[in-house]
Image: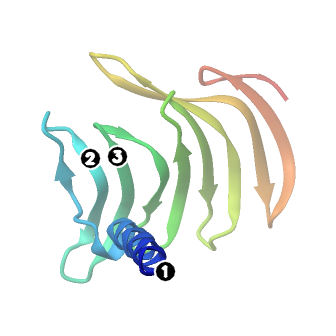
Amino acid sequence: MKLRHLFIFLTFFTFNIEALASWPGLCKINQYNKEGLRHGRWIYHWDEAKKIPMNKLRFKNGREFGLNRYYNEDGKKWLRFRAFKDGRMIVTYYDEKGKKERKGEALMIYDPLEIRYCWHGKWKFYEEGKIVRTAINNMGQEVEE
């Protein structure tokens, strides 16, 4: 019986330590890995004193991954994307009112000489929250509507 209680306690304790370590408020920000590449949570500010965010990003060995957000100078979100490790992205742009303006697929191409971003795949364009047009892009060029 005591062994069972010890097992339950250790399981619960281990889970809580892992949960706390992944809690955004407890993570260190703007850190580098051993190779000097950005790693983990990064936040840049338009104004350090006012703490107005420019962007909130996540990196894994120098590459953006997961959910990332960009903000304009008054703190309103204007871009959000989810980056995958193969370079694919799902991107959403927002207008000044915070409404969806366009959403689609993109690629982030990591080349040793440069990093390139291009729309690649299906895109939806919105006005007042309603889809007004769709388009297919291939490496940044619209190929069909």
Report, in whole angstroms, how far the alpha carbon at label 3 lies from the one at label 2.
Answer: 5 Å
Locate residue 15: give its quadrant: bottom left
Which residue is denoted by mark 1 in the rendering? Answer: 1
Tell me the quadrant of the picture where the C terminus can be found.
top right
Label 1 sits on what residue type? Met
Residue 53, position in %: x, y? 34, 70
Number of residues whose C-alpha sits closer than 10 Å to that of mark 3, classed few (under 14), some (14–19) or many (20 or more): many
The three-letter code of the residue at mark 3 reads Phe
Residue 39 is marked as: 2
Give the residue drawn at x 40%, y 76%. Answer: 6
Q: Is residue 139 left or right of 6 when viewed as pictured?
A: right
Label 1 crowd (10 A; few <14 / some 14-19 / many >=20): few
Indicate the amino acid at tag 2: His
Residue at horizontal 29%, vertical 62%? 43
> Under tag 3, what secondary structure?
strand
Give the left or right position of residue 5, taking residue 126 as reference: left
Q: Are marks 3 and 2 in contact (CB under 8 Å)?
A: yes
Residue drawn at x 70%, y 26% is 137
Q: How many marks?
A: 3
Give whichever of 7, 48 is nearer the camera: 7
| Residue 31 percent location from the top left of the image | 18, 54
In whole angstroms, how far apart are the C-alphas of marks 1 and 2? 44 Å
Q: Which mark is residue 59?
A: 3
Q: Secondary structure at mark 1?
A: loop
Measured as percent of width and height from the top left, residue 72 is found at: 43, 66
Disc 2 crowd rating (10 Å Cα; few below 14, some 14-19, many 20+) is many
Q: CA distance from mark 1 to mark 3?
A: 45 Å
Q: Nearer the viewer, mark 1 or mark 2?
A: 1
